[in-house]
Image: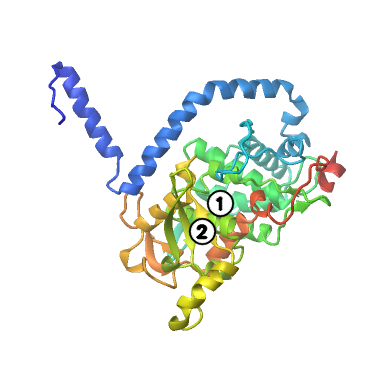
Amino acid sequence: LPVPMFLPVTMDSAERIVETIQEIKQKIPSDPYEAELILMAEMVAEDDENNDKPETRKEEKAVKKTPEKQEAPVTDGETKHLMRPKDESGGYSRPSSHHITGTSKKPVEVEIPKLKSEYGVDAWKRWIQWRQTQPNLENPRFDFIIKNKQTWLLILTSARPLELKEDLLSCTTAELSYGLCCFIAEVKRPNGEPYSPDTMFYLCLGIQQYLFQNGRVENIFMDRFYNKFSTEFTNLLRGFKPSITPSGYIHSRVEEEFLWDCKQLGAYSPIVLLNTLLFFCCKYFGFTKVEQHRQLSFAHVMRCTKTNLNNTKTTFLRFYPPLSGPEAESAKKRKEEESKEEILEMMENTENPLRCPVRLYEFYLSKCSESVKQRTNMFYLHPERCCVPNSPLWFSSTALDDTTMEAMLIRILTVRELHLDTKQQTSDDPPFIPEEEEDSE
């Protein structure tokens, strides 16, 4: 049995211990899943701090070897930088998957792509400078904002002019919301050519990252006040498909890692958590249409555990498609259909629990009402209008509408990794340069 021990401490030490206990109590929320995610985030942050120094040295060496013209964001070198160097197989270097392969190989260091926010910020500045030379482009005037039923409306009147500034951080939310609408419609490359939709997404993600890094918490892709920009931006991306070379290499400037970096994936808010579930179902189930996602329901997505050959256990999510026939016949046909059809599963991510589909789905369930957890016709729920991170419920009992889901899918499907199964790249792929960039050089 454990034996309690009393250690003598000074009054100052005792007070500090009490203060530390109070700080821990305030920091850890009552929800066990939310508390676990926060603790995991701190562990990952500590690992990042420990690895900061060697990574910094590697980055410094890489910068020394990189030609200066590729670092100049105001020239066409910007476009070249957005295309990362490829590995020997002709594809971009990717982090290792969490799946275990049959053959054992020596671990190879791979470069995780990182979003460069300075390219989006510099593109914004260049655009503002160009706009100031255009006398025919006038800024609207705005007076105030009102809330009409379920929609935030920006009332444009003849009060004071809405000023667009070079410094993104100096822009109010109203100015930034309007400015982003103009930005995606008017911005051009330094040589006057238009940006491709995926490059435009890259630049806007850079702006989003810059805002987050400097204490601006608004999400320009999902917050209601940016609804007009989000709608126009979604229309810009509609119909986009990655470029594919004859040998099968897939090219898009939007990488999965960028969405994690910009807090478009994760458990930062109800809408971001929904976006993450949609992303996982696109990535692991291959669902690319709203109709496919509507098949999902709480009753048909199950958390399962299996024992591996080495006696370790693996947790995963499995989707059981709804049965179409009578229940009496379903039990017999079930096994036959499962043997014929591909089983849809999401494996847990043990390397990074903060990006684990199983843990994030469990967290999603913890923020939903008990009344919906056995529903056979619901999976994606509409976020509650008034909630904070510590709220017990993040989601209502109303299904997410098709329009919102479609807009989220359009943005998600620009991610390069979601198209890797459509074509297999070969080892003799030459370095890929889109035609539009060849012309600009």
| Labels 2, 1: front one | 1
At numbered mark 1, what does the secondary structure look like: helix, strand or loop? Answer: helix
Kind of residue at disc 1: Ser
| Closest to the observer, 307 or 39 | 307
CA–CA distance in space, label 2 to label 1: 10 Å
Kind of residue at disc 2: Leu
Q: Which residue is mark 1?
A: 177
* Tag 2 near tag 1, CB within 8 Å: yes
Kindly identify which numbered label has been placed on residue 109.
none
Tell me where residue 372 appears, x and y as whole percent: 36, 68
| Closest to the observer, 12 or 90 | 90
Residue at x 47%, y 82% (from the top left corner)? 329
Tell me where residue 306 appears, x and y as whole percent: 44, 53
Q: Which residue is mark 2?
A: 154
Q: Is residue 110 above or below residue 298?
A: above
- The reply to whether residue 143 is visible in this rendering is no
Q: Is residue 286 above or below residue 431?
A: below
Residue at x 19%, y 28% (from the top left corner)? 18
Q: Is residue 143 above or below residue 97?
A: below
User: Along the horizontal axis of the image, is 11 left or right of 120?
Assistant: left
At numbered mark 2, what does the secondary structure look like: helix, strand or loop? Answer: strand
The mark that comes first in sequence, 2 or 1, is 2
User: Along the horizontal axis of the image, is 226 left or right of 83?
Assistant: left
Q: Residues within 10 Å of mark 1 (few under 14, many from 20)?
A: many
Quarter holding the N terminus is top left
The number of numbered discs placed on residues in the rendered structure image is: 2
